[in-house]
Amino acid sequence: MPLEIIRNDITKMDVDAIVNAANESLLGGGGVDEMIHRAAGVELLEECRTLGGCSVGQAKLTRGYKLKARYVIHTVGPRYVDGKHGEKALLESCYRRSLELADKNGFQSVAFPLISSGIYGYPKDEALRVAIDVIGEFLFSHEMTVYVVIFDKASYKIGTKLFDDIKEFIDDNYVEENRILRRNAAYASAAPQCPKQTLEAEACFDEAISPSLDDRLKDLDESFSEMLLRMIDERGMTDAECYKKANVDRKHFSKIRSDVNYRPSKQTAIAFAISLELSLEETEDLLKKAGFALSHSNKFDIIIEFFITNGNYNIYEINEALFAFDQSLLGA
């Protein structure tokens, strides 16, 4: 997928370039900077000595030497004071200048740390939001795979209110007893239509809600890819607008367009539902075409339902939440 949040050691990323959260001297420091210099070897420091430092919010390029990454983009993040000293604009500039440098050099994959969120004190949830917003904006007009690399769970944090709201929504819906009560209530409503009670009531209910073979065959009239392409046209979207909002790359989308029998993963199918801003009912219909459904016995599904019912179709914010709750991310 074009933008992915992953838990890893950034020095082990096999990409065209990793981004180093450096200081203005570019001669090494603490945290991520120290890790990258140690992994790359002394040659990296020797090249950095020739660059004459770097201003806050700007970026410079070196080779990667002993790293798996071919290059290192060095950028200097702001020190956080109180959020009223231009910190956000400078942090945004770090991401933009780094991405522009990657694009200028033809890089196809870049991995970022959460810049300024360590010893420079930028609040982690705010630093993450800046990263996701700037990278997301860039990817809407560029083809590139970008990773936000989180070293450990403690260094990752979404907004407290969002986290609490999602947790409360999960607690209200992810309860086995609730599912049993709903099913029992459904059986009770179906039972009076049956000639007998007890076991026959359940059999009658299952027959009432189960579609006939004819209905199932009719449901095959339109495949997932056909339904998706029709919905894109109905909403007046271009292919690029749709697959970029779905966090899906162009090559993957071309497979969908060229194969009427294409079968997506559940994450990819939901990603397109988010891109098209479908209602919960419309999302269920699209998922059925791929052989999936949403369930209250699945935390991933409940989180998706939370965002759809709240009208939030920002796929990057959804993926932030999914990552925070240790769930698979949306995209391909």
Image: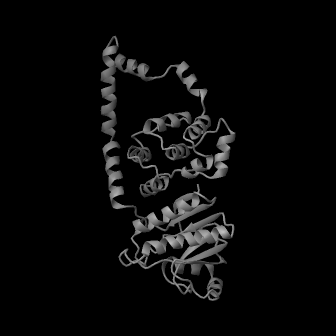
Q: Quadrant of residue 20?
A: bottom right
Residue 332 seen in the current view:
no
Q: Position of residue 134 (x, y in %)?
A: 51, 64
Q: Position of residue 16 (x, y in %)?
A: 65, 68
Q: Position of residue 78 (x, y in %)?
A: 46, 78
Depth order, front residue of 150/201: 150
Q: Quadrant of residue 41?
A: bottom right
Residue 146 seen in the current view:
yes
| Horizontal relation, residue 74 to residue 280: left or right | right
Q: Quadrant of residue 83?
A: bottom left
Q: Residue at x 43, y 19 (%)?
A: 207
Q: Residue at x 32, y 47 (%)?
A: 171
**Figure label count:** 0
Residue extending farthest top: 195
Q: Residue at x 58, y 45 (%)?
A: 237
Quadrant of the image containing the N terminus: bottom right
Q: Is residue 212 above or below residue 90?
A: above
Q: Is residue 157 above or below residue 61?
A: above
Q: Position of residue 188 (x, y in %)?
A: 30, 22
Depth order, front residue of 262/43: 262
| Horizontal relation, residue 187 to residue 258: left or right | left
